[in-house]
Amino acid sequence: MITSLSQYNKLGFVRRLSLCFIKKKKMNSDSFITIEKINEGDIYYFNLNKRYFVFQVLKIVTDLPAPYDINYKYGYYIAVFKKTFKDIPKSKNLDLKRVFVDKYYRKNTAGYFSIWNNKEPSIKCKNSNLKKYKLKAKPEFTYLENRPVDDFKKFNPPLLPLFSMGGGEPIYVEDYPNGISNYPEVIISIDQVLIQILEEEKSRNKKNEKINPIFFPDWLDYIDGTALLKTEKAISIFELKEGSKRVKENALKKCIEKLNMIDEKLSHIGTIEREDIIEKLMEIATLKEITEDVADNIIEENRDW
C-alpha cells in the first residue's frame, strides 16, 4: 500500500516539491501566508516584482479514497493564467482562458496545479524557497471575484479534469507545438507556482532585452518575444504595401491570415491583444484610404482570434 508522498516519488507518480508563503513583513523561512475560505471558481491575483498574475481555483477535492486519505485531506486544483498586468487587474480585463505555459523551467507544461494538505482547508506558502529571487515585495494573494468553472476544454491548452493525487506520466496535448502537458502537477504548497513563474520570467526577460517593438511596446511585459516579433512583422508588411485599392485590401487580408497562422502556433492573442491588433490595423487601413466598413469586414471575416 502507498501511504506517503516519498513512495509516490519512487514510482514516478509525483514530483516532490517541498514549497509554500509569507505573512509577516520580513521575509523569513518560518512565515506563512494562508488563503482560507476557498470556494470553487475563486479568482485571486498576486504581485511578483511589480507584475500582477492571476489564478483561479478550478476544483476542490475532499474525502479522498484510501490510501490517499492518510496524509492528504484537501486538494485544490488551480490554473495560473498567461495574461499579466502592470496595475491591479480589473474584472473586465481578465483573460480566463489562456493558461500560463512554462517553456523553460518545466518545458511545455501548462500552469495547472493540484495543491494538497492534511490539516485545515487552506493554501499555504513558505518563503524560504523564494529568498534567492530577491523579491521587491512579499507576495500576497488578493481575492478578486468568483466565476464558476463548468468546462475544462475551454482553456487554452485544454486541461484534463483528473482530480486524484495518483496518476502516471504527464499527458500531452498533441495539437500544440512539441506537446503541452495538461495533467495537473502535484505540489504540497504554492511556492512552486511562484518559482516556475519567476524562472520563466527571468528567461523571457533576457530574451526580450534586445527587442524594440514598433507597434506594441507594452506587450514586452507579458508576451513571448518571438510571438511579438512575428506579429509586428506581419503588420509591417501590410503597412508598407502600396498599390491600388484592391492591392491594399488584399494586403490586409493576407496580414490577417498570417496572424491566424502565428496565433495558431504560439497562442498569444487574447482579448487585449485582439483589441490592440484591430485598432492598429484600422489605423493603418485609414491611412491607406481603405474605408472603415471595408476594413472592418475584411478583419472580421478572416480572423480566427
Image (cartoon, rainbow, N blue to C red):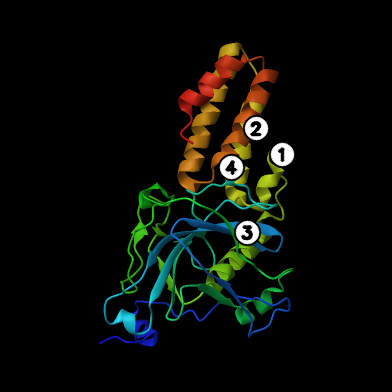
Residue found at the very far front of the displayed protein: 37
Badge 3: how crowded within 10 Å, few (<14), some, or many (20+)? some
Which residue, given by chain and number where applicable, does mark 4 sit on?
A: 92
**3D distance between C-alphas at marks 1 and 3:** 19 Å
Which numbered mark, 2 or 1, is in the foreground of this view? Answer: 1
Tell me the kind of residue under disc 4: Lys
Badge 1: how crowded within 10 Å, few (<14), some, or many (20+)? few
Percent x, y of residue 4: 36, 86
Answer with mark 1 or mark 3, whichever residue precedes in sequence: 3
Which residue, given by chain and number where applicable, does mark 1 sit on?
A: 214
Does dot 2 land on a helix, a strand or a loop?
A: helix
**3D distance between C-alphas at marks 3 and 2:** 24 Å
Percent x, y of residue 77: 42, 64
Which numbered mark, 1 or 4, is in the foreground of this view? Answer: 4
Decide which of 242, 37 is in the foreground and name it. Answer: 37
Q: Would you identify the image quadrant in which residue 136 lies?
A: bottom right
Decide which of 218, 139 is in the foreground and name it. Answer: 139
Tell me the kind of residue under disc 1: Ile
Decide which of 74, 125 is in the foreground and name it. Answer: 74
Q: Residue at x 56, y 15 (%)?
A: 294
Which numbered mark, 4 or 3, is in the foreground of this view? Answer: 4
**3D distance between C-alphas at marks 4 and 3:** 27 Å
Asked if residue 69 lies left or right of residue 254, the reply is left
Q: Residue at x 68, y 58 (%)?
A: 51
Which residue, given by chain and number where applicable, does mark 3 sit on?
A: 204
Which numbered mark, 4 or 2, is in the foreground of this view? Answer: 4
Contact? badges 3 and 2 (CB < 8 Å): no
Tell me the kind of residue under disc 2: Ser
Which residue, given by chain and number where applicable, does mark 2 sit on?
A: 236
Answer with mark 1 or mark 4, whichever residue precedes in sequence: 4
Contact? badges 2 and 1 (CB < 8 Å): yes
One can see residue 271 in this view = yes
